[in-house]
Amino acid sequence: MRTHFIAIGGSAMHNLALALHNKGYHVTGSDDAIFEPSNSRLRNKGLLPDQLGWFPAKITPDIDAVILGMHAKADNPELIRAEELGLRIYSYPEFLYEQSRDKTRVVIGGSHGKTTITSMILHVMHYHNVDVDYMVGAQLDGFDTMVHLTPYNDFIVLEGDEYLSSPIDRRPKFHLYQPNIALISGIAWDHINVFPTYENYVEQFEIFVSHITNGGIFVYNENDAEVKKVAEAAINPIRKIPYHTPNYFVKEGVTYIETKEGHMPIEVFGAHNLNNLAGAKWICQNMGIDESDFYEAIASFKGASKRLEKIAENSRNVAYKDFAHSPSKVSATTRAVKEQYPERTLIACLELHTYSSLNPEFLKEYEGALDAADVAVVFYSPDALKIKQLDVITSEQIANAFKRNDLIIYTNPEAFKEYLFHLKFDTEKIALLLMSSGNYGGLNFDDIRQLI
């Protein structure tokens, strides 16, 4: 089968390209910018385009499938040529569905936690040598790619993102998968640039549940009031399985979870991660892994990449970075680190980087999100506002939104870096938490490792 990727350099797109290449497909692609690690990974497989840019001549009648990435625009020259030729054009999720029509589709959705839960499931399967197809939004230890497709595996595990499918397909990605087994971990308003009201956002999860196949299984977090409401309102013929945060305690910096066989130490921590673990357990059990085997495997799970990832530690200090950016995840992550290190000064730093977090109307959702921190710092770049063509946000608006009088605010990357480098790591016990979907205007996290 011959496939061509328009915007092959994206994180998700290049991983799908690699997976199809590994499956034996003839893969080509184009992009106007390709960064690391996509560049090297595509080059190593001979898939890196010879030139950057869009070339309609690449689009020929013998192409079986054109896969369109979100980075491309609706007026992309290659897309226009494909439409002229009447070629089959797929969004990323639409093509994944086509690849998994004859498999049991397991889809993990939620405003937060979906990458971690998907990663937990794949870790357990890998531990027990159970091969499954998958698509996950983070690079995992022991896995070559973030996408794996075969003609023979019975299950495919898909991270179900609620963002749009492509520039010409405005449906949320997870609406296209039609799961046999589904999970929702939580619902907290996000992507305000696409879903302008909270009600509109929640509706996308209602539609997702309605697309579960008849006789399918719906695993849901009953600790989340909105998820519980969506689950109870669903009328399609499915089996509903609620889960909740299990009992646990923290002793000398180690989290212990309560199981039928006693208290078991685990690598991850925080109530939100214990809640994620409970959801992953139910999914694994419905995939044929019994409870005791699940716990045996999950004990060695250290977390998904960029999700509460420890970047440095010594006897006095510790530093974590986390992809957290939505208000609910910021709050959960901040509480988790403080609970894990109650005797240390928690300095929680948040970069406002996404469209939602930089929207003045959405900012109020962050009220209380950093309250668990001893020191709260917010960074945002005026340049990011210009690039995203958003209205100017003032420091006063930020301070009023978080409702914290001692909030420290930075807009200059160098000033923020200077602040970090003058923290008293040599005389105080500090837990540093860096939360962002960006990099604070160019912060090198290796420099933080040198500080601790």
Image (cartoon, rainbow, N blue to C red):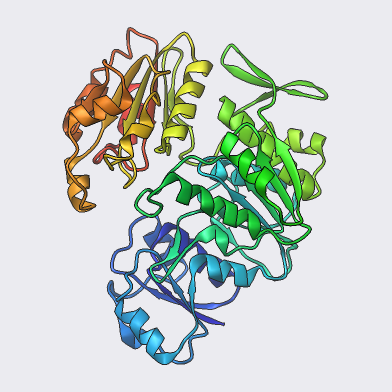
Q: Quadrant of residue 57?
A: bottom left
Which residue is painted at 78% across and 48% down in the image?
286
Which residue is painted at 22% across and 22% down in the image?
419
In the picture, measured across the screen, residue 409 lies left or right of residue 341, that is: left
Q: Position of residue 323 (x, y in %)?
A: 42, 39
Q: Quadrant of residue 40?
A: bottom left
Relative to 204, say whether 221 is above or below: above
Whether residue 201 can be seen here: yes
Q: Quadrant of residue 100?
A: bottom right
Q: Position of residue 151 (x, y in %)?
A: 70, 71
Relative to 118, say whether 81 is above or below: below
Relative to 47, say whether 282 is above or below: above
Relative to 68, say whether 348 is above or below: above
Q: Quadrant of the N terminus?
A: bottom right
Which residue is painted at 60% across and 48% down in the image?
142
Q: Give 314 or 419, whichever is nearer the viewer.
A: 419
Q: Give 430 or 90, whichever is nearer the viewer.
A: 90
Whether residue 135 can be seen here: no
In the picture, measured across the screen, residue 247 lies left or right of residue 307, that is: right
Q: Position of residue 422 (x, y in %)?
A: 23, 18
Q: Quadrant of the C terminus?
A: top left
Which residue is painted at 26% across and 32% down in the image?
379
Q: Position of residue 415 (x, y in %)?
A: 17, 28
In the picture, measured across the screen, residue 69 lies left or right of residue 183, that is: left
Looking at the rendered structure, the number of numbered marks drawn on it comes to: 0
